[in-house]
Amino acid sequence: MEHPVPTDYLRWIVLLPLLGAATNGLLGAGLQKKLGKWMISLLACAPVVISFLLSLKAFFDLLGLKPEERFLLDRVYAWLSLGTLNADVAFWVDPLSAVMILVVTGIGGLIHIYSMGYMHEDRSYWRYFAFLNLFTFAMLLLVTADNLLLMFIGWEGVGLCSYALIGFWYQDHVNARAGNKAFIVNRVGDFGFILGIFLIFWSLNQQGHGTVTFREMQRFVPLLEGQEMWGIGVATLATLLLFIGATGKSAQIPLHVWLPDAMQGPTPVSALIHAATMVTAGVYMIARLHFLFSLAPVTLAIVATIGALTALFAATIALTQNDIKRVLAYSTISQLGYMFLGAGVAAYGAAVFHLMTHAFFKACLFLGSGSIIHALGGEQDMRKMGGLRGHMPYTFWTFAIAVLAIAGTPLTAGFFSKDEILWQAFSSEHGSALLWGLGVVVAGLTAFYMFRQFFLVFFGECRADSHTRAHLHESPKVMTMPLVVLAAGSVVAGWIGLPAAFGGSLFAGWLEPVFGPHQEAHGSAGLEISLMLLSVAVAALGFYLAYLVYFRRTLAPERFSSLAGGLPYRLSYNKYYVDEIYQFVFVEGSLLLARIGAWFDLHIIDFVVDGSAKLTAFVSWLNGLFDDYVVDGIVNQVADSTFAAGDKFRKIQTGNINSYLYVILGAVVITMIIKLRYWS
């Protein structure tokens, strides 16, 4: 690969939302008070719109280059240089990241505009937009980073912002708890992700090519073939660790539990998380590191299996949920499963294609649900809705188009992208009939639960209370116009990815410089069309059942909920009790360990410490006795004896000179007598 062309405007795609976040975060409260909320809206929305325009410029710059030269680099400065580890703050745009920045800034920009109407009455308007801009910045950093370390900064950034936005109304304990749950569960996945980064660098460094820069990694990762650690191939182990990070960020089983609770945040936040930013990060990471995952067929099989099982698992839960946003949340988990299924069969382009189309119709659905909740004064229970079609025409028609798209209705965006994944799952060398079958079943379930929602919300008699019915209204233009744009994208976005049987995919051709020449799956055009028709028929069956149960009402829902004694219904309605199991095993287990630790500290550690203190006090008491009666006794006795001897000797020191002379004379006489005696 040749050296990319430097383009210094790329940095502003990423940094402008950061500038908006900093301005509103630091000055927003004062500006909102003095100038009003229009200034906050301008400071928040303008940077994202300008970033979108710059993203379009990057796209057209790439389009003007030869396919093999379609990459742009903006190196800002050298960030790290530690031994063999070198990493720059540099922004890399190629066809893959170009798709992502257009999705993030385009869909994200519409969500910013929509938020102006949805959040207009909120007192913390400035704080909301500061975090929304920061979220956009973190996601743009993630998808434009030219190395794993810079990507990890964005990766952690979206996790932090999701915590702040999910718990935005933190005064309510439920919201704060949901934010904490998202943050903690993502830390579990992120631990695996960072271990994967370390292992990749360490393994490449052993081969003399330690690097975390993507374009250099792509050149050197073939050196990892044959390397093992603990009897596992290094490429397999590293990709499994990275996939753990992806399961957390993109809500795949078993780390999916945070995403449904993320519905506690404002609805535009739900749209941003589910459609344009955080949950797509894991899919993008695998696509970006496709050259590494392709060396690990075991990991690819695990990715495809987890994706298919997650799609089925979440779809069965969505069948019975009554909260309008919770249905969409499990739908997101299911659709992400489709994307991982595509990535797991090495159809990376198909996975990214579904990521792009899903952004349109899922954002439309979430913002549409926000419009409904706004009209109903905060009500989210679909059992208290109904008959909204005549009151909310813009919301109704845009929601209908998005439902058709996610259900895989022919000629919509969801049909083309979902069909591409199913075809690849069936006919590629990494696919299987089982994976395809699971995907087809999920297509039928998706059509059922989405049309169930559609009929419950917009048809029949309005089940809201009289006060709510009296105030039903369509949302303002600032909220409905983004819905119209997203609904249009839910149809036309798919036409750039036509199946091979209908002429081939422009989208796949666009991504060829990243993933290499598009490899058509093995199988005839006739087989592809036959499988396509079969999946459409299954989806049509799902629609027809929903039509009979919730529109015509010729089938009672109780006929399904009472099957097998009601056990399947209870499992689905209670989300297979996964939250309860996690609460018992991990939360209560952690609390039990804490209580055991407290008991051990109180009765063992404190006993040892207190015993040591008492033993020390006893030894000190003995030492005091020894000091008082032995050491001090000897010292005092010596002193007393000395004092007594001194008292006696003192008596001969009278101070009388005559006495001293007599003593001297006596001593001299005695001395002379002794000497004379010895001499004689």
Image (tube, grey):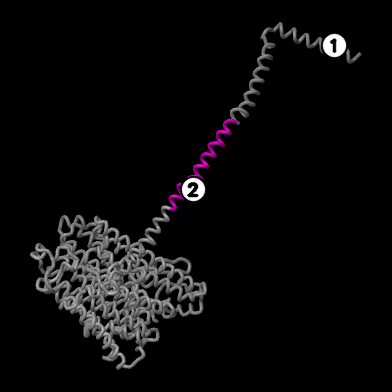
What amino acid is at disc 1? Ile
Which residue is at 23% across, 74% downward? 362
Quarter of the image for residue 59 reads: bottom left
Vertical position of residue 577 compared to residue 530: above or below: above
Nearest to the observer: residue 587 or residue 110: 587
Dot 1 falls on a residue whose secondary structure is helix
Residue 658 placement (x, y as % from top left):
71, 6
Farthest-out residue, top: 658
Separation of marks 1 and 2 at Cα, in angstroms: 85 Å
| Residue 65 is one of the magenta-drawn residues | no
Vertical position of residue 527 compared to residue 651: above or below: below
Residue 255 placement (x, y as % from top left):
36, 68
Nearest to the observer: residue 46 or residue 379: 379
What amino acid is at disc 2? Ile
Dot 2 falls on a residue whose secondary structure is helix
**Range shown magenta:** 596-625
Farthest-out residue, left: 470
The residue at which mark 2 appears reads as: 604
Residue 290 placement (x, y as % from top left):
39, 79
Tell me which label, 1 or 2, sits earlier in the chain. 2
Nearest to the observer: residue 31 or residue 243: 243
| Residue 618 is one of the magenta-drawn residues | yes
Residue 136 placement (x, y as % from top left):
27, 68
Quarter of the image for residue 69 reads: bottom left
Nearest to the observer: residue 325 or residue 184: 325
Q: Answer left or right for 666 relative to 406.
A: right
Which residue is at 28% across, 82% downward? 418
Q: How many callouts does the rendering have?
A: 2
**Quadrant housing the C terminus:** top right
User: Residue 443: which numbered mark, if any?
Assistant: none
The residue at which mark 1 appears reads as: 673
Farthest-out residue, right: 680
